[in-house]
Image: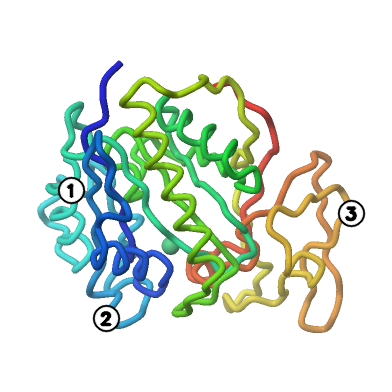
Amino acid sequence: MKKIHKVAITGGTHGNELTGVYLINKFKKNPSLVKREHFETFFMHTNIGAMKQCTRYVDKDLNRTFTIAGLNDPSLGSYEDKLAKEINQKIGPKGSQNPNIDFIVDLHSTTSKMGLSLCISTNDKLTWQVAGYLKECMPEVNIFKWEGDTDDIAFVSSIPPSGFTIEVGSIPQGVLRADMFFETEKMIQHVLDFFELYNTDKLKKTYTNIEVYENSKMIDFPRGEDGYINAMVHPTLQENGYFKLTKGSPLFVTLDGEEIFFQNDETLYALFINEAAYYEKGVAMCLAKKKTIQI
Ligand SMILES: [Zn+2]
């Protein structure tokens, strides 16, 4: 079994998601909080330009900038394109079998009521073992399995072969929420504990199956020909994280109060409901299948 030498914790990938920004500040002041005996913990702010402005990004979304194609394209010169290349040198390079970092945890928050969630976009075995351990320590953690449209995943968490994104919410953009701050810190501590046990052969079990919400599709708001939204997320969904949708469930309500219903025969779950950052991406919510997978 290959030992883990270096674990990275990254925050501020989106400059207005303050949980990660301030957890990294906390660790900078007191590195012993994330220190373990049998591996090195590395932590950094990823998008300082966006953090200074308290915006999601400066020119483009850093968490959509880590495709191999983009990293290898010298003609891409935006602030985040350049930043991605720098970060890739530090904690990658992406695609390498021997990257500088063995495992990455990228910290995010969402305006949607997702509670404590992991977003995992890899089939890497180690990543899923960490997820299994974390869910055992904190059963309230939900896992969103993101297959992606292509193999060239663009997330920060995709730089080394192993790692995931933590998403907690609901937290408004540019806001620190103490309860979620401490819960996120607890998740990080469990991840670090896992690797201490892993490196010293003290893990008590191997996880074989795990419940996930597997991405099915993303849906946009109903829009008029002018591009403006003409229906809002239905109030029934608003204060929910993983909302079960069956045929006939309310989905949207028009500005005039007319309800629009879910028409799918298959039961799906709505996630990232009414996430503020996704308005510009044309996404009102993600739909996922709930299932138990073999890991
Ligand atoms: Zn984010």
Can see residue 91?
yes
Q: Which of the marked residues, 2 or 3, is nearer the chain's N terminus?
A: 2
The location of residue 188, given as percent across then percent down, is 42, 50
The colour scheme of the drawn protein is rainbow
Q: Are marks 3 and 1 in contact (CB under 8 Å)?
A: no
The location of residue 237, given as percent across then percent down, is 76, 64
Q: Which residue is mark 3?
A: 248
Give the Cα distance between marks 2 and 3: 45 Å
Name the amino acid, label 1. Asn
Q: Tell me the residue at 65%/67% (across/down).
A: 221
Name the amino acid, label 3. Gly
Give the Cα distance between marks 1 and 2: 21 Å
Ligand 1 lies in quarter? bottom left
Q: Within the image, what quadrant is residue 168 found in?
A: bottom right
Residue 66 versus residue 3: which sits nearer the camera?
3
Q: Are marks 1 and 2 in contact (CB under 8 Å)?
A: no
The location of residue 191, given as percent across then percent down, is 42, 42
Q: Tell me the residue at 57%/40% (across/down).
A: 137
The location of residue 5, given as percent across then percent down, is 21, 33
Rendered view: 132 above or below 177: above
Asked if the beta carbon under badge 3 is closer than 8 A to the nearest atom of ligand 1, the reply is no
Q: Which mark is residue 52?
A: 2
Q: Which of the marked residues, 3 or 1, is nearer the chain's N terminus?
A: 1
Q: Tell me the residue at 62%/37% (across/down).
A: 212
Q: Which residue is mark 1?
A: 88
Q: Secondary structure at mark 3?
A: loop
